[in-house]
Amino acid sequence: MITTENTEMIERDLVFVGGGHSHALVLRMLAMKPIAGVRLTLVSDTLLTPYSGMLPGYLAGHYSVEETHLDLPRLCQAAQVRFIHARVTGIDLERKQLQLADQPPLSYDRVSINTGSTPNLAVPGAREFAIGVKPISQLTHLWQDLLDQRGPGTRPHWAVIGGGPAGIEVVLAIAARFAQEGRPLELSLVQSGATLLPTYGPAVQRAVAAALKRHGIHWVTNFRVAEVTADRLIATDGQTLPMDKSLWCTPAAAPTWPGLAGLAVDEQGFIAVNAYLQSTSNPEVFACGDVAAMVASPRPKAGVFAVRSAPFLLKNLRAVFAQQKLKPLGLQRDFLTLISLGDQRAVGQRNGIGFSGRWVWRWKDSIDRKFMALFGSGLPGQNMTMTEPMHCAGCGSKVGPGLLAETLQNLPLYPRAELAADLTQAEDAAVALRIADQPVWQSLDGFRAFTDDLYRLGVVATHHAINDLYAMGIAPTSAQVWANLAFSHPRLLKRDFTRLMTGISQTLIHHETTLIGGHSSEGQETHVALVVNGAGSGRWPKSGLQHGDWLLLNKPLGSGILLAAGQQNIASTAARTDLWQHLLASNRDFFIALQDHPVHAATDVTGFGLVGHLLEMVRQTDCTVVLDSAAVPLMVDALALSEQGVQSSLWPQLQPLLLDCRVGSVSAALLACLLDPQTNGGLLIAVPAPTGALLVEWAGVHKIGTVEAAGGPGGKKIAII
């Protein structure tokens, strides 16, 4: 999270589109020395971005995903950069706005684009049957699927299309991987020309040819693919090549949206930039890496140029905001080339001199690992010790139940016969007034911001607040909003407020709820809360448990732990992905499905965790709840992080709730998960057993316990087994 305390007023937005090598290096450098008065934002449709230099080693099995991918949210958090997880679909050059898929536009003052290229699958049939190596993130996602498709005893035939360095590295990496695992595979390297690596010297050509022969790879020349079918390649001259899979390493294509938006592009559609990496048509736009084309001094689309462009891009971004003179890009035309040969050998060339061997691979491995180390423990701020205790945001920022109850029970209240007078026994929503004996229900919920993506914050906060009415069996009808935005310049404040309110208003529409007003303010941190209203008779009391009921939960636990891990920058990509999948998920469909079934009791799981809300349900009853801890669904890595001691800052205030429980042989880490405060948690319901048997057929609905007659040692209301 970006904070505003003790910082100067930020007035302008610099947005980076894409997490390519150039941008990753620039963001790392900006973390050490920011641009005064400028807010930084990275927009990416992926959380991990692969380092192209290590991709062949990953395919060959020499490296893991973690060793070969940059963690973009982790980088952004260390660099104090807003991270927006979204796909850019266009750019409005006049309004200076990026168009995002499934999100409102994002405004910028300057923008830098480093999205790479897209697979060139223009050949008929290629889009349906081929696999493009670019973008690299697509190949890494598909690679494991390809490996899993190998049947025992079969000998598939894969063809790699493209005889350049990329095609050679990919085909040799695949050969090495299959040989290492003892799996049979027939491989062909298909190229349209007659010469192997024509722009390289004889030493490199000989080393590559020897590697192809050593791995038994068929080298197919003068084969220009005209069509791809499910089981063969067809050349322009009528030749055919039977195969099972084809991977395309041919020159990639440009994304279409820059040209469609009116940015100047070259003949292939890549963004045309000048010597300063600045758009030749729109000076507010910069571009680098594969997506850019230097019109005056063209360079190959190679990772080495993207890496070496980073310092020049940074200097020019600093200069343009300071209204200083820009510095032209200065890159040599000849550079060190290292090509992996699959089996921990490599070949290289510099200044026309070629060399090869295992020592070259070790040299390349050392260079690649040093690059990746820049984004590991070498990230700025990664080794800083915390001088103050961490305080969670989201529902983990709430006041603990003990402190809350002690305060509320001593407050003086003005009595009204039609309104509840005991705040300590409040339901999820309360009757605010009656109109012609029809109760109008109201609830208020909100929290500190836990993300810099204010659109997503608005979505989550709205789902979270409306859950209180759903937990009463009440459909929401109207809502008001209180938004406290972190101090910023009025220009940026307007942009932030628009994104936040768009997330709220769109989500209210999803819930068929009308926004009727609210209040806004500024402060040190961003907070958001909603008052939601609904009318009707509350059909689902919190304490309506009946003997024999099944307890059902429709969302996993763990958001408090994962948000805490995210704040400490130790959450894995899989955990962050799973967390956001559930944070953004609505309970509306489940609520609607329950209208046709008897629900004896209900609540939603929020700040007091599963155990705390179960205690609220059972306290005023003659029932005992048997909670099956092994059946409780958990988010990815929640238990593992809990075992490492990661917990919400609210957890110590929730731990005393276990004194009201009879605890079996359940690990401390799992108990912590059962106490974990949830943001936009699931609906917890008690239903008759036959109804429960029907509802668990729903995806994501879990039976987590049963309701029995009161009894047991010490009169404990909850037994955790």
Image (spheres, rainbow, N blue to C red):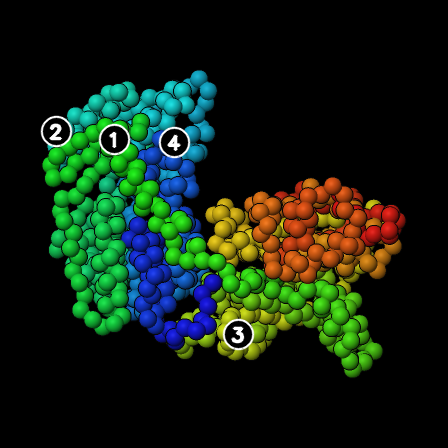
- In what quadrant of the picture does the C terminus appear? top right
Q: Which mark is residue 359?
A: 1
The image shows residue 413 at horizontal and vertical percentages of 78, 80
Q: CA distance from mark 1 to mark 4?
A: 19 Å
Lower sequence index among marks 3 and 1 = 1
Q: What residue is shown with label 2? A: 202
Instruction: Give the amino acid at mark 1.
Output: Trp
- The residue drawn where x is 12% and y is 34% is 353
Q: Picture coordinates of residue 716 (x, y %)?
A: 83, 52
Q: Which residue is mark 3?
A: 484
Tell me whether circle 1 and circle 2 mark residues in contact (CB < 8 Å). Answer: no
What residue is pinned by disc 4? 61
Cα–Cα span, label 1 and label 2: 19 Å
Q: Are marks 3 and 1 in contact (CB under 8 Å)?
A: no
Inspect the image, locate mark 3, and give the three-letter code of the amino acid beneath it: Asn
Residue placed farthest to the bottom in the image?
Answer: 414
Label located before the other in sequence (2 or 3): 2
Looking at the rendered structure, the secondary structure element under dot 2 is: helix
Can residue 134 be seen in this snapshot? no
Residue furthest top in the image: 153
Q: Is residue 86 above or below residue 49?
A: below
Front residue of this view, candidates 463 and 529: 529
Distance from the alpha carbon under mark 2 to that under mark 4: 29 Å
How dense is the environment of label 1, judged by Cα within 10 Å: few (below 14), some, or many (20 and up)? Answer: some
Q: Of circles 4 and 3, which is in front?
A: 4
